[in-house]
Image (spheres, coloured by chain):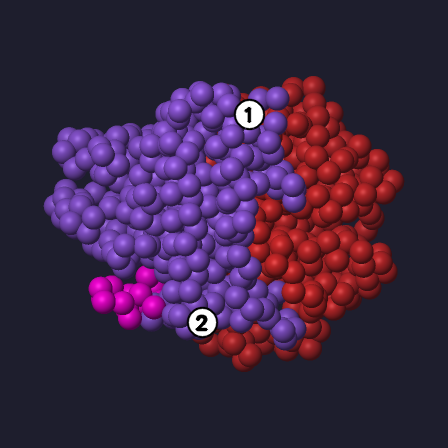
Chain colours: A purple, B red
Amino acid sequence: MVINGPSFFIGKNSPDVISFGSGQPDLPPPKEIELIIRDCSDYKYGLVQGEEWLRDALSNQYNNTKQYTNSTKDSFVITNGASEALDLTFRALSRKEKKRNVLLPKPYYYSYPFIINFSGLNPLFTELKNNRIDLIDLEKKIDDCCAILINSPSNPTGRIESIDTLKQIEELTQKKGINVISDEVYKDLIYERENYFIKGPKVITINSFSKTYSMCGDRIGYLWSNDEELIKNVIEMKTHTSMNTNIKAQKRAFLATKIPKEYIESQRQIWENRRNLIYNGLKDIGFELNNPEGAFYVLPKINNTNKIVHDLYNDYKIIVYRGEWFGANNHIRLSYALDECKINKGLDIINTYVKKNNLL
Amino acid sequence: MVINGPSFFIGKNSPDVISFGSGQPDLPPPKEIELIIRDCSDYKYGLVQGEEWLRDALSNQYNNTKQYTNSTKDSFVITNGASEALDLTFRALSRKEKKRNVLLPKPYYYSYPFIINFSGLNPLFTELKNNRIDLIDLEKKIDDCCAILINSPSNPTGRIESIDTLKQIEELTQKKGINVISDEVYKDLIYERENYFIKGPKVITINSFSKTYSMCGDRIGYLWSNDEELIKNVIEMKTHTSMNTNIKAQKRAFLATKIPKEYIESQRQIWENRRNLIYNGLKDIGFELNNPEGAFYVLPKINNTNKIVHDLYNDYKIIVYRGEWFGANNHIRLSYALDECKINKGLDIINTYVKKNNLL
């Protein structure tokens, strides 16, 4: 059996498996989002850009933060998850930009290089230094690029970048006229500070209802930008490649925007408790790792990741991912999107396995 | 005001407008598809290829026709409407094929050239002859192409190709190893015969629940192929570009597959009555046009289509589309996906307008 990437594990989440694999919340979505009334208009084609009530609600959310974003409903496109938002963005940029490289920090979310390649652009990497973006390396490479892709909080590292770094990236890219794609799908899962929302005339932020509201299967994401031409190009492309996003899912997303902030805070507290549990647990076993500041991933160091991923799955029914799939050699990635009971059980088994095999 | 394509009219369907524009059924979807039970698993990531129960149901449908298709659940990928099925197919072909042209009959569905271009391939056209595919021209051009795109029943012509023609295309493409993309989204709306299902080792059929079950807004389409490599490549691409298709919409599609055949027959009868009404009405006004054999479009001849489309919309609140948007110069396209009352009223106004302006 060859386990060659995260997709190997799709559909393998039977009850006797403990999965530190997939990055989806185990929590149920809020009850408030359920639709009760049959409404035939849900089955009509909708606006390709997304329904106005949902874009208005998002616009209010964006403008009601400390960092005023100057958003209107025209700043948003509702998409089939953040994945389609990323795909449409890079395809639109690819049709317009002369420079063909996209700069992104390494390690990276495993789909990024695929999405960039599929669009006809090339990924160019800047290695993290002490688990942070290395601004010197970034500045060296950015002139060859039409865009930079930032993901804070980050999958797979769980790090957030300092506000100072994000502001320097804003300034640098604005000076050079380079597009910034800021994937902020974990914006509501930060343990250190509020999200810093990257802004600027050529900034596109990518977002989703999947992580905040545990609605992964509904595939409701969106992009935000004040770059009118980019928005126009994205809508034109989506008109032909998928048309409107599912209307009923947009209604559920709209209902989610009405849920009081306390809900998000209570969810965040659950994630923080789990973060503490897994970070301390892995440290006690002897792993070297950074304490996650956001999202729900840890990336401990270890060699022989291929063997470990196979052994843990085949012999112990534990799913962990190779860091190599995310550009992080000699690391494994664990998602802690599962309950504390399972986290504890999983950690016990991992402890037994690494001790038995003298892996640390 | 410049009306530069079908997208101009999106969202302009107020109650006082009679729209012969958009190709979506005005009929409500069947009641049987409504979901009643809250099920948290609908919000989990699903299989990128589509849920197994839906693909099994489709496979049974495909195998239970007179033309046995040798299908299994592995022959299908569930997508965000037929649009995404087309987009993924052409993107997958574009990454593999050396020849860069795709042959398609002209007139064509207006999104085809966009989707082909976006994928990096080039559309190459074969003009219809007497409203039929010209096999001599097709055979002349096909050697330069990696694929041919067939759409029978056709948008915008409403024609169906003869089974003989479709069989010759099967044979020719199989001999030459050329991919066939057969867009059969109107397969259940044929007034002349049953659908002929194009088959072969390099055939990909595109389908949808939108037209048969009036579920456009739900965006549930699918592709079928026995080309395992193509299916694998499409799934790999979708893993990164949109992940699973909305789960609840897949459940509704599954319920739709359980609705007895009589439902489809009764719908077809409604469409046929409307077809007769609009065909005879336009003929009585003095238009030259072909009698549609399937789908719900007519394509009457007339000059000055730009002026007509603007006048009818601005002065009479009637939406019709320019044939030019579909590669049909000096024609207008009317969708008859609206009730007989509105069809009659619309025809009366069109009659007054063309008489007043001596346009025929």
Mark 1 secondary-structure assignment: helix
Mark 2 secondary-structure assignment: loop
Residue neighbourhood size for the residue with mark 2, other residues' Cα within 10 Å, grouped as few (<14), some (14–19), many (≥20): some
The quadrant of the rendering that contains the N terminus of chain B is bottom left
Q: On screen, A335 above or below A68? A: above
Q: Main secondary structure of the magenta part?
A: loop
Q: Give the magenta part as a residue range.
A: A61-75
Marker disc for residue A259 = 2
Q: Which chain's residue wears label 1?
A: A
Q: Residue at x 45, y 54 (%)?
A: A211
Q: Which residue is drawn at 34% across and 64% down?
A: A74
Q: On screen, B68 above or below B288? A: above
Q: On screen, A6 above or below A24? A: above
- Between residue B72 and residue B289, name the one nearer to us: B72
- Tell me if residue B220 can be seen: yes
Marker disc for residue A310 = 1
The reply, left or right, for residue A263 in relation to residue B96 is: left
Q: Residue at x 19, y 35 (%)?
A: A134
Query: Residue A358 lies in what quarter of the image?
Result: top left
The quadrant of the rendering that contains the C terminus of chain B is bottom right
- Tell me if residue A247 can be seen: no
Q: Position of residue A220 (x, y in %)?
A: 48, 56
Q: Where is residue B115 in the image (x, y as percent from the top left)?
A: 49, 42
Q: Which amino acid does label 2 sit on?
A: Ile
Residue sitting farthest toward the bottom: B16
- As for residue B111 lying within the magenta part, the answer is no
Whether discs 2 and 1 lie on one chain: the answer is yes
Q: Residue at x 61, y 59 (%)?
A: B40
Q: What residue type is labelled 1?
A: His
